[in-house]
Image (spheres, rainbow, N blue to C red):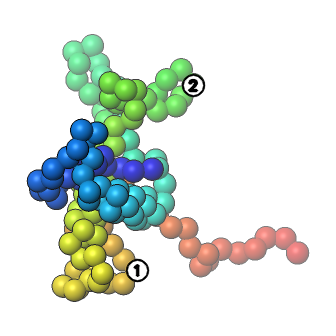
Amino acid sequence: MNLVTLDEARRHLRLDVDVDSNGDSPDDPDLRLKIAGASAAVLNYLKSRRNLWVRVYETDTAGDEVLDSNGDPVPAVDTDGKPIYVVDSNGDRLIADPIKSATLLMLGFLYRDRDENADKAFEMGYLPAPVTALLYPLRDPAVSGAGLRRRGP
């Protein structure tokens, strides 16, 4: 699942490309590959798609968001209790802005440093700090095996 479009990637990278009659450029195969890689890195870090899309929130009769006892907006749900998401004109769910931004930042790292991490922007096996700063609040925490006991004989 790609979290950004080819056009969004071109704009983010500020690529001024000549496109053919189909809207393709010679760099598109490489860019598509990097979009897929950046998207996969973000999805792997999140570990869940729970916070991936923009949700609809409950509103009162005045059109203001309904808040719970903690002051957080109350997500809207359908009659089956499933979350309602914001969709585009094609009916596709909209990706949340922090996730889209993190994906574009990761794409920039992949595009700029094609072969290595020359400026040591991140540790091997980890995402760059600006990417994790956007994603960390949305990440599902890992369940550790420490402290868990096996029950039974």
Q: CA distance from mark 1 to mark 2?
A: 40 Å
Q: Nearer the viewer, mark 1 or mark 2?
A: 1
**Residue shown at 27% from the left, 63% from the top:** 107
Q: Which residue is mark 2?
A: 80
First in sequence: mark 1 vs mark 2: 2
Specify whether residue 65 is in view: yes
Crowd class of label 2 (few under 14; some 14 to 19; many from 20; radius 10 Å): few
- Find disc 1 in the rendering and name its residue: 125
Q: Quadrant of residue 102?
A: bottom left
Q: Amino acid at mark 1?
A: Gly
Extreme right residue here?
A: 153
Marks 1/2 in contact by CB < 8 Å: the verdict is no
- Image point (34%, 58%), residue name: 29
Q: Residue furthest top?
A: 61
Q: Amino acid at mark 2?
A: Asp
In this image, 83 relative to 130: left or right? right
Residue 72: x %, y % from top left: 30, 40
Query: Front-most of 93 and 150?
Result: 93
Q: Position of residue 58 (x, y in %)?
A: 34, 25
Camera-side residue of 100 and 80 = 100
Residue 135 shows up from this direction:
no
Kind of element beneath mark 1: loop
Judged from the image, the secondary structure of the residue bearing numbered disc 2 is loop
Name the image quarter holding residue 152: bottom right
How many circles with numbers are drawn on the protein? 2
Q: Residues within 10 Å of mark 1 (few under 14, many from 20)?
A: few
The residue closer to the viewer here, 116 or 128, is: 116
Q: Relative to 130, is 81 above or below?
A: above
